[in-house]
Image: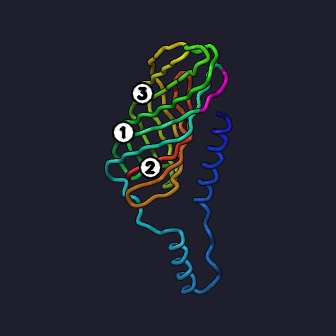
């Protein structure tokens, strides 16, 4: 799981930095500079700014992981959410996130079977755009942890969900995002998610 985190953090850092790089216009007259800016805008895919005024829906899928008996296990992670923008930079809503990991265990039932561990979170969530292309989010809600194969137990608790991400592509009404998400479930889970959000 450590490698997943390193790849995710590195990609987020490079993407966020690249979106802030400003390229100086060539030293030329006003007309040439204006023409150069027009070509730059066209090359960068100039588009209308996102609305971020009404309802929003998001769905994400990626790689998740959980620390099981000290040994980290990787698996599949997903999240969905629905809410409403309360301003151009903030949205509130309901979010569901979960991670499923599986591994082979000689002690599993039946003998030499597989173990399945699911950890999920459901609750109210706040998303805040620090800058137009970088956001953070979080909330406190209900968590569930289910094991099948060893303990065969399902536990419920109260936990937090935290995430941070960048916008890879954005149009007037939608965005493609990449985010890191940590859910306070026992065992704690983390994920790198590629998502779509309707703005």
Q: Is residue 173 left or right of residue 131?
A: left
How far apart marks 2 and 1 lie (CA) works out to 16 Å
User: Residue 157: which quarter of the image?
Assistant: top left
Is residue 42 visible in the rendered structure shown here? Answer: yes
Q: Name the residue: 39% across, 60% down.
A: 172
Ranked by sequence position, the earlier of labels 1 and 3 is 1
Query: How is the rendered protein coloured?
Result: rainbow
Q: Is residue 193 left or right of residue 92?
A: right
Where is residue 96? Give x, y as percent: 41, 34
Q: Which of pointers 2 and 3 indicates the residue nearer the eye?
A: 2
Q: Name the residue: 36% across, 47% down.
A: 56
User: Is 71 part of what is drawn in magenta?
Assistant: yes
Report the residue marked by disc 3: 141
Q: Secondary structure at mark 2?
A: strand
Task: From the image, give the main secondary structure of the stretch colored magenta.
Answer: strand
Range shown magenta: 70-74
Q: Which of pointers 2 and 1 indicates the residue nearer the eye?
A: 2
User: Is 44 part of what is drawn in magenta?
Assistant: no
Where is residue 105? Give x, y as percent: 63, 19
Q: Name the residue: 68% across, 38% down.
A: 3
Q: Looking at the image, do the residues carrying marks 2 and 1 touch, with CB atoms under 8 Å apart?
A: no
Looking at the rendered structure, the number of numbered marks drawn on it comes to: 3
How far apart marks 1 and 3 lie (CA) works out to 12 Å
Ranked by sequence position, the earlier of labels 2 and 3 is 3
Label 2: few (<14), some or many (≥20) within 10 Å?
many
The disc placed on residue 196 is: 2
The disc placed on residue 171 is: none
């Amino acid at each position: 799981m450590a490698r997943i985190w390193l790849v995710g953090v590195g990609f987020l850092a490079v993407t966020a930095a690249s979106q802030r790089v400003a390229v100086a216009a060539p030293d030329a007259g006003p007309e040439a500079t204006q023409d150069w800016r027009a070509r730059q805008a066209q090359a960068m895919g100039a588009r209308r700014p996102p609305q971020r005024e009404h309802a929003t829906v998001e769905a994400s899928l990626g790689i998740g992981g959980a620390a099981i008996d000290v040994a980290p296990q990787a698996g599949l992670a997903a999240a969905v959410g629905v809410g409403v923008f309360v301003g151009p930079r903030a949205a509130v809503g309901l979010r569901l996130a979960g991670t499923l990991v599986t591994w082979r265990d000689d002690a599993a039932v039946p003998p030499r079977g597989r173990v399945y561990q699911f950890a999920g979170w459901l609750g109210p969530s706040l998303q805040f755009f620090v800058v137009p292309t970088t956001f953070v989010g979080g909330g406190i809600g209900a968590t569930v942890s289910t094991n099948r194969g060893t303990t065969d137990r399902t536990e419920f608790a109260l936990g937090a969900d935290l995430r941070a991400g960048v916008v890879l592509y954005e149009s007037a009404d939608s965005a493609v995002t990449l985010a890191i998400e940590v859910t306070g479930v026992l065992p704690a889970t983390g994920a790198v998610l590629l998502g779509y959000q309707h703005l």
